[in-house]
Amino acid sequence: MIVTITMNPAVDISYPLTEFKVDTVNRCDIARKTAGGKGLNVSRVLHQLDAPLVATGLVGGALGEFIKENLAAAGMRFAFSEISEATRNCVAILHDGKQTEILESGPTVSESELVTFYQALNDLFKEATVISISGSLPKGAPTDFYNQVLDLAKLKQIPVVLDTSGDSLLAAVQHDNKPFLIKPNAEEVAGLLGISEIKNVTELKTSLQSELLCDIPVIVVSLGSDGALVKAEEKIYKVDIPKIEVTNPVGSGDATVAGLVSGIYHGQPLTDYLKKAMVLGMLNAQEETTGHVNLAHYDDFYRQIRVYEV
């Protein structure tokens, strides 16, 4: 079973607009509201792949209830821990081929709520074979909280796919019990290494071979429309993807994570699950609904992806 962890979920609200006008009224004919947060986007794509999973995290208030109702309506299994403060909203305004996001910081959690959640994880991990952790930590959680989850997973010998950023990502890559896979972008890799920027693929390749990152088995660095650069043990791979028409890019990185998690769960070779991940990311970008893929186009995209050592 796959356990997906979303510590700071949200109700995702998407407003598609033909034109976004500042300092005046914008009217939207179709607003979409879904259970969101990076880990729940991952969960929805895994559910479409018929992967056995349970989604967990922290929810509270009326918006927390909406999240549970939304997942239940989709037939998804979940086991959230309740908190006293309300879950947040996150708004994406899609306009002029661009995406403007307004992200609430969300609730503050207490130490006792974190202890309760950690105890619940201990029970969930008895069934788990892969763990997927996505997104930011809520206020009140220590920067190294994900390290506690990594320690618990290590005790049970469960691989962890970690998709986060900032201080919590740095804490995880510096930790003795490291995640099996991380998925930063080039800017986040530069931040980990304390450098201003990474200018090209050559510099990125060198960065992935740094001492800080060398002990992480797999690092998948998203390059947007240019695919990805991947470090797997001692080797570096480039993943090339076809050009596509993008409808809504929100959640495409999470769909990519779903592909990585699915591949690891099924014991697929690296090349195969990298292709799966890229396909799912592209399919999500072609849909209006976040965390949704049209699998009818899967094989066509899969055949167009190249993975090769560089």
Image (spheres, grey):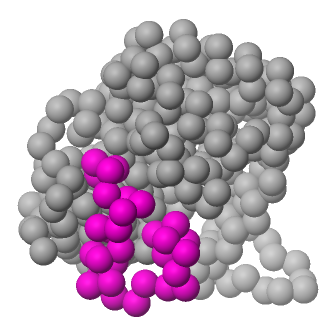
> Furthest-bottom residue in view?
199
Question: Magenta residues, as a range?
Answer: 189-218
User: Quarter-wise, where is residue 283 in the image?
Assistant: bottom left
Q: Is residue 84 above or below residue 272?
A: above
- Residue depicted at 64% across the width and 30% down the height: 57
In which quadrant of the rendered view does residue 50 lie? top left
Where residue 226 appears, as percent x and y from the top left, is: 30, 78
Q: Could you tell me which residue is drawn at 83 percent across and 21 percent down?
A: 112
The answer to whether residue 137 is left or right of residue 27 is left
In the figure, is residue 205 to the left or right of 65? Answer: left
Q: Is residue 129 above or below residue 183?
A: above
How many marks are shown on the rendered structure? 0
The quarter of the picture where residue 19 lies is: bottom right
Q: Quadrant of the C terminus?
A: bottom left
Is residue 149 depicted above or below 174 in this figure? above
Task: In this rendered view, identify the residue nearer to me: 199 or 276.
Answer: 199
Asked whether the viewer can see residue 152, the reply is yes
Check the image and report above or below for 57 versus 25.
Answer: above
Question: Residue 238: horizontal and vertical position, in percent?
Answer: 19, 71
The residue at 58%/80% (across/down) is: 98
Residue 242 lies, in percent from the top left, at 21, 74
Q: Is residue 30 left or right of residue 60?
A: left
> Can residue 298 be seen at all in this image of the molecule?
no
| Residue pictured at 29% horizontal, 67% vertical | 209
Give coordinates of residue 208: x percent, y percent: 33, 68
Q: Is residue 299 magenta?
A: no
